[in-house]
Image (spheres, grey):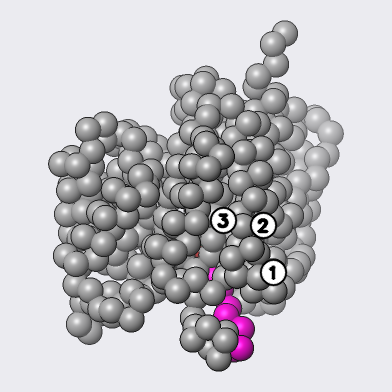
Amino acid sequence: MQIIDGQIKIIKDSRGNNTLEAHLLAKEGDGKNVVALASVPAGKSTGAHEAFVLDPKKAFDKFSEIKNNFLKINFRDQREFDSLLIALDGTQNKSNLGANLILSLSLAFARAWSKSRGIELYRYLKDLSDNQKKLFEDFPRPLFNVVNGGAHVEIPQSWDKKFGIKKGLDLQEFQVIPTVKDFGIGLSVGQEFYKKLGKELSKIYDKENVLLGDEAGYVCPFKTNEEALEIMQELINRHLYPLKIGLDAAASQFYSKENDLYTIEKSQMTPEEISVFYSDLFDRYELISLEDPFDEESFDDFHRLSDELLIQKTSNQSKKLIITDDLTTTNPQRLKEAIEKKSGNAILIKLNQIGTLSETIDVIKMARENNWQQVVSHRSGETMDSFIADLAAGSGAWGLKSGAPGKPERMAKYSRMLEIWKKENVVF
Ligand code: PGA
Ligand code: ZN
């Protein structure tokens, strides 16, 4: 496939910050020209080992500098295109061109490739990732982040006087995860739960004190992390919803390197103490998954907790996940270390942590080969691009994490999943 022309546009993400959208005009053989677009998100609780994000205005200029290097070349596959971008960048962490610029081009290339062949993007990604499973057999489940904490919330100043609350919950994400196989039913249940939870929180805290965080999850004057979990659990039980609870602690955000302590609800905990705290949450709320329970360098603490929870406590270990995000940053070297040190059993996949589709696919394959589940994830600053839905479905991931089913940037991914689910479930 040849790229005939390309453009970079600066657009706004869900936080109102600038981000990039790549436009490529491409042609396969004697076929028609196709136009393909892709935009990239941005994280806030970013891991130290993530690839570099270049200021979008600088990235715009960089693109003009490099554009001629890939026009009119006959690319044989995705990897050839991605490798050229990596070579043009020439750094370890993509600090020259920026992982955001590189990724927007890499994803637009993937779209152009599938479009010019008349195949669905998720089908192309299925092939690219060597996924041998039938798509609808083990379809990814959605992880709805219905209560927001950590770096994704801003607390009104008035809450200090009114409730004695200065900051949001320590744990970053409180998710509900459907246990049903049918994606359509899972999505409806998630949407209904999200609405009911909003009403319930309005009753408890008053409507004016129910706000939304970056990922459309609720933000209320909760006094403790457990208070939010209790309300969620009670609502699930009351309506017998087929939902389990999952958490993303994003613990690097409340960890102090100086003294190796975690601060939760004003009390300081050693890694051993916070492990007991997590174990207790697993027991009391029957958690299905826990992401980033420790700091992003703490491979051994991840291992100890995984060992305790997944081997000693759980009879069916495949049912519970310890997910690594900031620890592994969708990076093959980091994942290798995590696998060797047995630091969990699932990895969060974020394309922009590494910066090309090919490298992301490598990480997905490495995880699969080592029996680690994969959860494909959005970022807290998102666009309307739904590429990650195709990636989750195509690669056969365990889950897709795209926030609460509340704001358009989050819903774009869930809606695309539903579309794929329906396409793959036609009966004739
Ligand atoms: P981020 O948060 O996109 O702000 O990094 C998401 C996550 O930690 O999973
Ligand atoms: Zn995370």
The residue wearing badge 2 is 199
Compared to 377, does 164 lie above or below? Answer: below
Residue at 60% over, 70% down = 205
Queried on whether the Cβ of the residue with tag 1 lies below 8 angstroms from ligand 1, the answer reads no
Residue 212 in picture, x, y percent from top left: 64, 67
Q: How far apart are marks 1 and 3 (CA)?
A: 16 Å
Q: Residue 207 carries which label?
A: 1
* Range covered by the magenta-colored residues: 150-158
Mark 2 is on which residue type?
Lys
Crowd band around label 1 with a 10 angstrom C-alpha radius: few (<14), some (14–19), many (20+) = some
Q: Are marks 1 and 3 in contact (CB under 8 Å)?
A: no
Q: SS at mark 3? A: strand
Asked whether residue 247 appears in the rendered view, the answer is: yes
Residue at 57% over, 80% down = 155
Looking at the image, which is closer to me, 119 or 154? 154
Q: SS at mark 2? A: helix
- The quarter of the displayed image where residue 255 is located: bottom left
The residue wearing badge 3 is 146
Sequence-first tag of 2 and 3: 3
Residue 316 in picture, x, y percent from top left: 26, 31
